[in-house]
Image: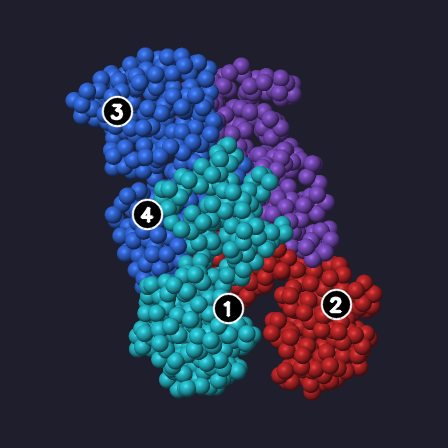
Chain colours: A red, B purple, C blue, D cyan
C-alpha cells in the first residue's frame, strides 16, 4: 500500500520500520527531520511537510504524543492533502472526543478515520508483536489487513466507532492504574502487620495475579524502586484525565479511577511527580502513616 | 506428627486427606460427623468432640467458615485440651482481630498459634498444590515443614505475627475484588462506545492481565454468566468487611476497597446477592445507565 | 408516669432531671451509684439493680454509651422485670441492628420498644431543648407525649420502625461528618492559592452555610484548634462504623461516608485519634502536601 | 470611577445597574445589544465593541458564562484597548488556570487583573447584597472600594493571587455539592427504614444544618421537586470539572468532590441532566435499589 507515517518517536519509528519491511511504499514525516534518517537509509521517502506525507497516500498513520499534536497535524496539511477515500489511522493514546472531532473533519473531506491505538512497548513494536485495536468502517478496517500483518501479533476489533478503540486503550490503562492502586493498598495493609513486601509480592504474582503487569509493578513496589522510571506519575495523570474525560463523554462514573487519580495527585503534591507511577503505593503508605 | 483436624468442609477434607496421605497420625472432628466418613475409611480416627480432636496432638488445624465458628471451637474444647507447647493452625479466612484474640488465649494456656490461611481452591488442595501463608513464632512455623510438604506447592512466610498471615489472605482477596471492580468500570466504559465485551476481555487477558484471575472474571463479565456462581456477592461482602476491619485495626484507609464494597452493596440492593460476585460489573453498568 | 431511667452520664442525668421536674415518678439506676446522688436529693428513688429500675414502671429510658452496654442492660434485668405492655426507650446512639434485636426481645416478652435518639448537647438537655426522634408503634409513641413535653423542643416522628429513629440519628451525624470532610477539602484547596483560612471560613459561614455546625467546625479548622476537643476522632470512627453498618443493613452504599471514614483512619494513623474530629481537615491537608 | 462592563446576563445587568446607580461613569457592552437597552435608558453609554467598552476606562468588569467567553473577550479588544495601569475584574466562575493565564496577558500589557467572583443570586445583586471575593494586588483591590460599596454586602479578601478568588468560589460551590450528595445518602438511608423524607429534612434543617443551602436543597430532595430547576445537573458537572481542575492545578486530591461528580454523571446517564442538580439524591436512591 501507499503509506504515510507521521510521528517518529521510538514507537512510531519502530512501527514505520515494520511497515517498510513489509514491502509498502512509505513516506514519513517528523517535526525533527533527523529522526527520519534511519528510515530514509532503509528506503523510505522523507516528506518535508505534513501535507507531502499525506498527498497521494492510501493511508496515513500518525503516532503522536497527545491530542494537541494530533489536532495540529490534522489541521496543518493532513486533511487538506489526504486523497478522498483515503484513511487516517491515529495510533497514539487520544481522548475519545479528539478522535470523534477529527473523524468528523475527515468525513467532511470525504476521507475515513480508523482509530487504532496499540498495546505494547517499542521493543514489541520492533518485533511486529503489538496488539492492535482498530475501530472504524468495516471495509476500511479490513483493507488495512496487509499492515496489521507486519505490525501486530493480534488484532482486537473494537467495532465501527473509532472512539471505541480509544476507549479500549484508555480502559486497559485504567484497569492497570487501578491494579497498582489496589496493590498499594494491599502492601500498606500487610506491612502494618509486619509482612515482608517481597513476600506479599510473591503471594500476588505466583497466584491469582501471575501476569506481566502485576509482576512488573509488584516488583517495583516491593523494592521501592521508584526511581527506575518506566512511566512517570505526571504522564499517568495525563492519562487518568483522558480516562475520566472518556467516562464523562459516555456518562460513566469511574469511582476506582478517581481513587487512582487522587493518588497520582498526592504523589505529585509530595514532589514525586517524576518518579515511576507505581510510587502511588508510597502515597497510600503515607496516608496510612507508614512514611 | 500427631495431627488434629477440625472442620471438614470441601477444603478441610481435601487438606486433611493430604495430611493423612503424608503418613501423619490424624484425628479429625466435624460437627456433622458423616462428613468424616471418607477420612475414617482412609485410616483417620474420628473424634466425637472438639476436645478429643485436640488432646495429645502436636498440632491441630482448623478450617472454619468464619470468626464465630473459630471462636466457638477455641472455647469449646480446643484450648482446654491442646497440650502445652502444641500448635493451633487456623487455615480459614479470619479477621486479624479474631486471630490476635485467639493467639492470646493460646499463649495464656501455654500453647502456640500459627496463622496459615491457604491460597487455592479445593481441587488444588486435593492435589497438594495450595499456597500456604504461615505466620507465627519461627520455630513453630519451621516445625510444621512436614505438613507444608504434603499440602502445598509454595510456602509464603508472612512473618512472626499470626495476624500478618490473615492480612495477606485478605489483601490478596482485596486486590482481586478491586480488580473485578476496575474491570467492571472498563467494560462499562467500552460498551458505551460500542465495543464488544468479548473483545475487550481479549485485550485485557491476552496482554497486561494474562492471569488466571482476570481470565476467569473477564470471562464471566463479558458473557454475563453471573448465575454460574463460584463465590456469591454476599460472601464477598463478608470478606470485604474483614478487609476493612483489618484496615481499621492497622489504621490503613482502603479507598479502592470501599468502592468495591459499595458495588457489592449495590448488587445486593438490586436482588443480586446470591449471584457470582463478578455481578458487581453489572452494578457498575447500571450506575452508567446501561441496564 | 412511672418512669425508670438507666444511664446517668451527663446527658442521661440532664434528661432524667427534666423528667423528674415534670412531676413524674422516677426511679434511676447507674452502674456507679454516686452519679445518682443529685437526682436522689432532688426526689428520685435510686434503684440498686437494673431490674429494680424496671419493675413496675410504665416506661424505662436508657441512655447508654454503646450497643454493648445496651445489650447488657437489656439482658441483665431490664427485659426480665419490665411489666408486660410497658415501654423501653433507648435514647443513645445505637446501631440499627442492635435496636432491631432488642426490639424483638421486648416483643417476645410482651413489651414495646420505642427508639428515641436525641439531638443536642447536655446543656440543651438541661434546658429541655433537645430534638427528639421517636419511632415505634404509634400508640406507644403517643403515650409518651407527657415526657416529650418536658424534655424536648421538637419531636420528629421517624415512623413505626424503631430502627428508623436510629437511622435518622446516624444519618444526621453522617451529614455532619461529610460536611467537615468537604470543608477540609475546601480549606486545603484555597490554602494552596494563598487564601487565609479565616477568610474562607467567613465566606462559608456568612453565606450558604450560616448554620451552627459549619460555624463551629469552620472555626476549629480555620484556626487549627484541634486540641479543644468536643468529640474525638476515635469516637467519630465508632460512629462512622455504625453509619456504614446501617448502610449495610439496608443495602445502601454510602460513598461520601467512606471518604469521611478514611480521613478518620488517616488521622488516627498519624497519631491524632484523641484530637477533635475536625482534625480530618488536617489529614486532607497532609494528603495535599500541605503539612 | 470610569467603569466598563461586559456581559449583561441577569447577573451582569443587575451589578452594572448598581454601579451606575452609584454615580459611576459606565460604558457597557453585550454581544446581543438589546440587553443593554435598560441600562442605556438609565444613563449608561453602550459600546459597539469590546474594545470601545475598555478604552479609557479605569476598570472593566466582565461577567461571562465560562472560560471560553472570558478568553474571547480578553483577546478580542479588551487587552488591546484597556489603558496601562487599568484593572480588569472577571466576576464569573472561572477556572484557576484561565484566571492565571489572563492575569499574565494583562501584566504583559501593563494592566492589572483583580479576580472577584460573587456570591449570591441576581436578586441579591440587584439589592447590592452580593458577597464579593476579590484577590489581586492590594492597591488595585483597595482602589475598587467605591465599587464594592454599591455592589456588595460583604467583601472577603482572598489574598494577592487572583486565582485564589476563583478557588474560593469553586470551593464554596464544592462544599455545597458535597453537602447535597451527603444529604442524598442520608435520605436514602433513612427511607430504607421507613422514615418520611419530610421528617428527615426537618431534623437536618431545624438543627445542625439550619442554613439556607440545606433548607433549599433538603426541601427539593424531600419532595422530589427536581423539575423546579434552579441549576441543572449539566451545569453542576461543568462546575465540578472546574473544581477538580483547580485541585489538579494545586495538587489537591478531592475525594468527596469525586463522589459528588460521579452522581452528576449518574444522573445524566439516566436522562436527568436537565433537572435540578439536587436530583443526584435520586441517583443515590437508585444506587440503593430504591427507584
Tell me the residue that label 3 is attached to. Answer: C22
Q: Residue at x 53, y 28 (%)?
A: B64
Residue B168 visible: no
**Residue beneath disc 2:** A114
In the picture, residue B146 is in which quadrant? top right
Residue farthest along the left direction in this orientation: C41
Quarter in which the N terminus of chain C is drawn: top left
Q: Are marks 3 and 4 in contact (CB under 8 Å)?
A: no
Instruction: Name the chain under label 1.
Output: D
Q: Which chain does the numbered disc 4 sit on?
A: C
Q: Residues within 10 Å of mark 2 (few under 14, many from 20)?
A: many
Residue sitting at 50 percent across and 25 percent down? B69
User: Which residue position is annotated with label 1?
Assistant: D9
Counting other residues with Cα less than 10 Å from the Cα at mark 1, is it few (<14), some (14-19), or many (20 or more)? some
In the visual, does D282 lie left or right of D119?
right
Which disc is residue B117 wearing?
A: none
> Element type at marker 1?
loop
Vertical position of residue C27 compared to residue A230: above or below: above
Circle 2 chain: A
Task: Identify the image quadrant of residue C10.
Answer: top left
Measuring from the top left, give residue B183's x and y in whole percent: 62, 50
Q: Nearer the viewer, mark 4 or mark 1?
A: 1
Which residue was labeled with disc 4? C212
Q: Nearer the viewer, residue A90 or D250?
A: D250
Disc 3 and disc 4 on one polypeptide chain: yes
Amino acid at each position: 500500500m501507499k503509506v504515510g507515517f507521521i510521528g517518529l518517536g521510538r514507537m512510531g519509528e519502530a512501527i514505520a520500520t515494520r511497515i517498510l519491511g513489509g514491502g509498502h511504499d512509505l513516506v514519513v514525516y517528523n517535526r525533527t527531520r533527523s529522526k527520519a534518517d534511519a528510515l530514509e537509509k532503509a528506503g523510505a521517502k522523507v516528506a518535508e511537510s505534513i501535507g507531502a506525507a499525506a498527498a497521494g497516500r492510501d493511508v496515513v498513520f500518525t503516532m503522536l504524543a497527545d491530542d494537541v499534536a494530533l489536532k495540529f497535524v490534522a489541521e496543518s496539511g493532513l486533511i487538506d492533502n489526504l486523497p478522498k477515500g483515503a484513511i487516517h489511522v491515529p495510533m497514539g493514546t487520544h481522548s475519545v472526543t479528539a478522535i470523534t472531532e477529527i473523524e468528523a473533519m475527515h468525513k467532511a473531506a470525504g476521507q475515513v478515520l480508523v482509530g487504532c491505538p496499540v498495546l505494547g512497548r517499542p521493543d514489541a513494536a520492533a518485533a511486529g508483536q503489538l496488539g492492535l485495536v482498530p475501530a472504524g468502517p468495516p471495509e476500511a478496517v479490513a483493507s488495512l489487513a496487509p499492515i496489521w500483518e507486519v505490525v501486530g501479533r493480534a488484532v482486537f476489533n473494537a467495532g465501527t466507532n473509532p472512539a471505541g478503540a480509544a476507549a479500549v486503550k484508555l480502559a486497559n490503562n485504567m484497569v492497570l492504574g487501578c491494579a497498582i492502586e489496589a496493590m498499594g493498598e494491599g502492601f500498606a495493609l500487610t506491612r502494618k502487620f509486619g509482612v515482608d513486601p517481597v513476600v506479599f509480592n510473591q503471594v500476588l504474582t505466583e497466584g491469582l495475579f501471575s501476569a506481566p503487569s502485576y509482576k512488573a509493578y509488584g516488583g517495583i513496589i516491593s523494592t521501592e524502586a521508584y526511581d527506575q522510571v518506566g512511566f512517570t506519575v505526571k504522564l499517568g495523570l495525563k492519562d487518568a484525565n483522558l480516562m475520566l474525560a472518556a467516562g464523562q463523554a459516555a456518562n460513566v462514573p469511574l469511582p476506582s479511577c478517581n481513587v487512582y487519580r487522587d493518588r497520582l495527585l498526592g504523589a505529585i503534591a509530595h514532589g514525586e511527580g517524576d518518579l515511576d507511577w507505581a510510587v502511588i503505593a508510597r502515597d497510600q503508605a503515607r496516608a496510612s502513616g507508614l512514611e
